[in-house]
Image (tube, rainbow, N blue to C red):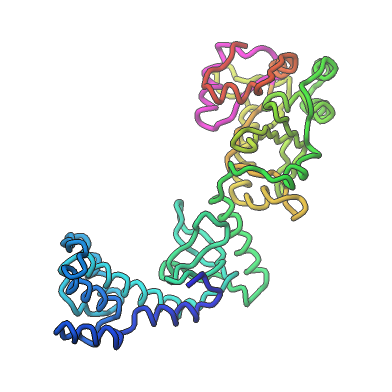
Amino acid sequence: MPPSDRWEAVVTALQAYAAEATTDQMALAAHLGYRLDARLPCVVAAALLRGRLRDTLQLERARPATDGQLEYVVDLAREVDQAILTPLDDREMVDAWVKVFHALRAIAALRDLRPCPGDIVETAGTFGPTLAEISSISSDGRLNFMGGNGAGQRPHLVTIRARASNPGPDYDEARYKAQQAAALRRDPSQKVSEADLRDLRRWFARGRPSLADAAALTDALAKAADERPLQAILQKHPQVLAHLVMRHHGGYVASQVRLGAHYVADFILAGMTSLGLRWTLVELESPTAPLVQRDRQPSKQLRKGIQQITDWREWLQENLDQARKARRHQGLGLHGIRPDPRGLVIVGRGALTAETDPLRSQIWEKHRIDVRTYDWLVREATIDRPFGGVLDLEDDTGDAEPF
């Protein structure tokens, strides 16, 4: 039986599956000179008959049940308040009773839940309770969830939180949370479609930075008292940032990306790889700020940059479906973005030195956030990297280049 939209149809099928022995089974047992208890479920009766015919039909020898298997079926019988009416001589008999008890448990749960596609349920997740939207009901009573990847749960392990038959603000909020949870389950490395690439076209930065790009950044940096003029220059010369992550396929640079009502990301970069799009969150801080304080701890501006990226990641965790959804579907169009993409904070001037390297390494290991200066950015704009940006090269190999 294929997945169904109606729980009643699944219950009817499960009742037939767990029904008492058939007249044909009773007749066969009588022919074999074996008295079959008419109360036995047909699945169990079939196992008994196969046992009687094992030698005649040259079936595999019976394997004894383990202590764990016996304990499980006894606990299951107690859970559904049913008696085990046969000896548990082998694993096939244990499995037959397990199938029956699973069917009875599913019947009771489905009758209690009355689930329908579109209903929102709460179920246990890896990191605690999570919401999911029902897409269909399998023949064994399992609830299948939106989002694919085999997501689902047995009905006795879920609770209905909102019903599709009762639309309104509460249902909309629950469904939104379920969509975000489904997005977290999806494989972010899936190849982007042609429609997705068209959606990204407005951010595409073609080619490596030119002399004019590097010079414009250098001139702006010489006069900048804070990050605002540098934001404007980098928006006009996106190749400077795309070059950091660009593979031979090209790079994408999105500026001033609004994440909900409270956050605006300075830049979000993407480079195409063999595993799909790889995204990087970029926060600009003042070029006049230091990286470290006198005690070699992160400066106030650097701490602010790290917190900004942390906040953006938290927003992505809670709104991942909206972030990945195409603009034509009222999403942000960040196709394939992970809930914890790599971060990059650009702050201060000068070269990256042995004095700052330990702190930068610590920040990367703890937060997956790179820390660089604007002078480093200017330098990178003048280096031709035909096979990958510096961030990808260092992240892939684990070996940082000298500065």
Answer with the quarter of the image where residue 105 lies.
bottom left
Q: Nearer the viewer, residue 17 or 101?
A: 17
The residue lying at 60 percent from left, 69 percent from top is 118
Q: Nearer the viewer, residue 206 or 13?
A: 13
Question: Where is residue 140 shown, x and y percent of the image?
Answer: 42, 71
Q: Quadrant of the C terminus?
A: top right
Magenta range is 348-374
Using the rendered image of the protein, determine whether residue 352 is visible from the camera's viewpoint: yes
Q: Is residue 201 left or right of residue 246?
A: right
Answer with the quarter of the image where residue 31 lies.
bottom left
Question: Where is residue 217 shown, x and y percent of the image?
Answer: 81, 19
Q: Nearer the viewer, residue 34 or 123?
A: 34
The residue lying at 52 percent from left, 54 percent from top is 149
- Examine the rendered structure and indicate whether residue 71 appears above or below residue 5: above
The residue lying at 71 percent from left, 14 percent from top is 383
Question: Where is residue 386 shown, x and y percent of the image?
Answer: 69, 19
Question: Where is residue 150 shown, x and y percent of the image?
Answer: 49, 57
User: Is 373 part of what is drawn in magenta?
Assistant: yes
